Amino acid sequence: MFFLRPSALRKTVALFLMTAALSCLHADDWVIAARKFSFAQKGTRSSVAEGAASLIPTLVLERISVGLDRETSAEELKDREYEKFRTERQSLFLQLSKEVKERDSVVVSERNADRAQKKIAEIEKKIDGIKKDIDENIKKSSPDYSSENDPEKKAPSFFHAPPFLRKNHASDIPAREEHVVLYKNSPDSLFEAEGSVGERRFEKAVIDAKINGLIDGVINVYGDYASVTCTLRGFPGAKVLGTVTEVGPLSDVISIAGNIARYIVPVVTNSLPAEIFFDIQPEECRSSVKIIFDGVVYNKVPPKIIARPGIHSLEVECDGFVSKSLAYNFSGGIQHRVFIPMEKTNPAVVSLTLFDPVPGSLYADGIFSGKISHGIPSASATVNGSPVMGRFVSEERGIEKIEEEYTDSSGKKKTRIVEKPGDKLGFFYYIPENLQKDGAQLVVKGKSVDNAAVIDKRRIWTYRGYTALVLSLPVTLFGTGKYNSSVNAYNSGYLGDISEVEKWNTVRIVSGGITIACASFFVFELVRYLRAASSVLPQNAVYADDDTIEAAREKSLLIVDEKVSSEVLEEASDVSEETSAENADK
């Protein structure tokens, strides 16, 4: 018997608990795939029909590609366990046949009776073990098997494995949630295998590809129209989870695939769909309303929308009213009434002034408002009573540092950091609703700087201050400890030299002062870093008086744009020519 040291034991226990927690938190994936649809009629078909056989399943998978979670039932999980047991039995049977053949060969080939009997005894022992494993497998895979009869559970013991590490039997598996992912993570990758759905070789190919759900379909073509019957099967077992038939023109396979996906998605998630009704007020808005639900445009209020449970985006637009956008988490199996009160637009024009003007362009809600240049620190913006998020884009560009590969004089390839012009600088600003009055004069105190570079610089200096503080602490603690020890020794009479106490007192004072200075420097740099990080937030606009506007205009006169600089150069050139002519005359 051996014992672990306390530190090693703590590490072992921590690693064990972490591994157990991760195994509990891990969520499996439910892989869904589709195969090329087949045709009910034999004979030649048009190129449009042939293309639809591959295009429809691809479009259906695209609609399912948005992150979904499936509530996988206990029955489906049991089927997977039974499949594992069946595969294990096949493997055990192959091992059994191998050992039996080896035993028979010993009887024929070994002439020494003692050696033959010894080898046969060893092989018989292996055969008995394999038979025992097969019987245990058959018992555990039986639907009537109950884990309550497991000998492991009869007598509780301290040495029992915890439930989350013990292998579950098929009858013990609870339902769980799994994340739906596409086969090969792409809707364009259709599954291909020989055979039909009912054949064992086809099911084996599906299971080997780790596919849990397979979409199959049959197309009936009559003229320019087609009837598409789509079936979703779960594996193992090839059980039919859902079937839907959709009819439509071959020229509009997008609508056919969309209607099929609308039915298939609730089957995939194994949950009831959500029914959504809209109540848009006032009534005058309903005549020209446009509803955009998950990117699908409705030019009038639909009677209802059936959608999968989960988060959906909604946009409502109406002439003369403020557009609204929202997202809501709809629950399955419930009727939802979405009430949307629309507000009439109240357009107003405000004057927006930069407190520190630099050359650039001013935008309000993505719409160009005006340019800031020499003598022009302001621009007009049209607002409609809703909060405005704007941006100022400077003509100055930041500096981007990138790695560049080059070849030195000796022919070796090396990398170096080079600086190139980056994106244009600027900042965001925000105009709240209470400031949106017609003719209001507003000012924004934003600075056009490279925020990323400033934040990175302040972060580096913060790390330096923290490093200096950490490095100074051991010296301070050591000096303080030695000073306290020397004082106690001197007071107790063990130390008769007072100079020793004074020496460590000096060390304590100096090191403590250095630590305080390092701590102050770290706090100072931390505050600067937090201020730099908060500079990316939108700057709020505020009311401006005439003095503030005049001060901004005087600052803008210092801006030298291209036009002003060319005029100054021309005037300087004319003055220089006149001076030269006068000197020549003299």
Image: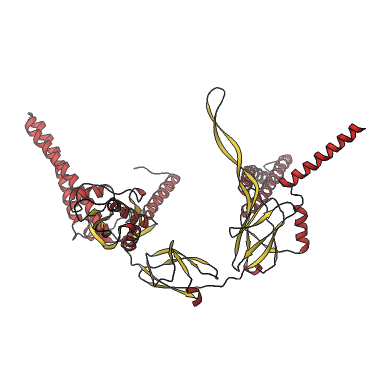
| Residue 299 visible to the viewer | yes
Number of marks present in the image shown: 0
| Residue 169 visible to the viewer | no
Which residue is drawn at the image coordinates 10% and 33% (left, top)?
Answer: 106
Relative image position of residue 345 (x, y in whole percent): 58, 70
Q: Residue furthest bottom?
A: 283
Relative image position of residue 255 (x, y in whole percent): 35, 60
Type of colouring = secondary structure
Q: Camera-side residue: 450 or 569?
A: 569
Residue 299 drawn above or below residue 416: below
Q: Residue furthest front?
A: 585
Q: Which quadrant is the N terminus positioned in?
A: top left
Q: Residue furthest top?
A: 410
Relative image position of residue 74 (x, y in whole percent): 27, 61
Residue 288 drawn above or below residue 294: below
Residue 312 drawn above or below residue 507: below
Residue 119 drawn above or below residue 141: above
Q: Quadrant of residue 63?
A: bottom left
Q: Which quadrant is the C terminus positioned in?
A: top right
- 186 relative to 399 in the view: left or right: left
Relative image position of residue 267 (x, y in whole percent): 30, 62
